[in-house]
Amino acid sequence: MPYGAVALEERRSLNPISWLMRVIRRTRRLNLGIYGPVNSGKTTLANRIAADFGGGEVGSVSRVPHETREVQFSEQIDMRLDGAGRILLTVVDTPGLATKITYRTFLRYGFKKSEALKRAREAAKGVVEAIRSLDLVDAALMVLDSTKDPLMQVNLILLGNLQARSIPTIVVANKIDLPHSQPWKVQGAYPDYTVIPVSALRGTNFDKLYRAIAEVARK
């Protein structure tokens, strides 16, 4: 039975006020931060979550690194799962993290030097904002490109910041639709965490991801 469809017998046994209070108690609020290195698919994932529950686009996606250079919020995403109740999500989509940012990266994508320098400055500022936003979230998705080394320095720095703040974290091994994807390496690198292999582009395994998010919201 979909959430919100209360059995007739249950509704008969409750007066309107007690029924409303039961619904309120079943509703949880969760500020969910989406973090990870550059071009790991964070905004694609954020857009998928929002779209699956009737929300609008969180941000634009591009092959150019650091397309997201500011923290973006999508509020009141109404996640309802059978047996898991209702979760009101605020999705916090963050700029990609990097240990080195240079304007030359943007030159390779056809930007003029002045625009490349501007983007590099914005990208560096975005990394700082992303780390600061950790103070706003209740839980985090650490999104990794499963075609790359899961133990890159930037990933370890991110995980250290999450651990320092005791933020419950789900590791998302993204891009399993690509031929060189190795999600088992992500699992092996982070054995103490829940690791969910997904394709944010195609929506693969998002049912498992949503169940993992619901489990975090219950705690």
Image: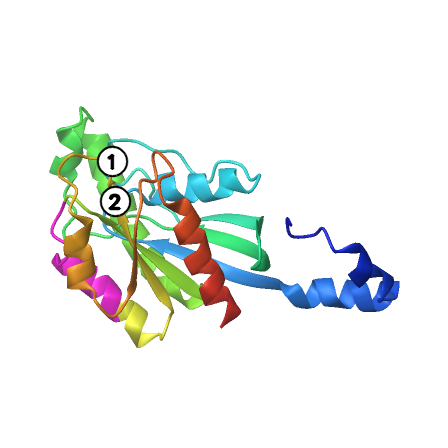
**Residue 168 place in picture, x, y as percent:** 38, 69
Q: In this image, 179 relative to 66: left or right?
A: left
Which of the two residues, 6 or 46, is positioned nearer the viewer here?
Answer: 6
Res 18 seen here:
yes
Disc assigned to residue 40? 2
Q: Of marks 1 and 2, which one's residue comes earlier in the chain?
A: 2
Q: How many marks?
A: 2
Q: Assign a secondary structure to mark 2.
A: loop
Give the residues in magenta: 148-160
Report the residue at 13% width, 59% height from top.
151
Disc assigned to residue 177? 1
Q: In this image, 107 relative to 49: left or right?
A: left
Res 99 seen here:
no
Which amino acid does the dot numbered 2 rest on?
A: Ser
Quarter of the image where one finds residue 186: bottom left
- For mark 1, does the 10 Å Cα neighbourhood hold few (<14), some (14 to 19), or many (20 or more) residues? some
Which of the two residues, 107 or 156, is positioned nearer the viewer here?
Answer: 156
Q: Is 155 one of the magenta-colored residues?
A: yes
Report the residue at 38% width, 38% height from top.
203
Q: Assign a secondary structure to mark 1.
A: loop
**Residue 124 place in picture, x, y as percent:** 25, 50
* Dominant SS type (magenta): helix
Q: How is the image coloured?
A: rainbow
Quarter of the image where one finds residue 137: bottom left
Q: Is 156 one of the magenta-colored residues?
A: yes
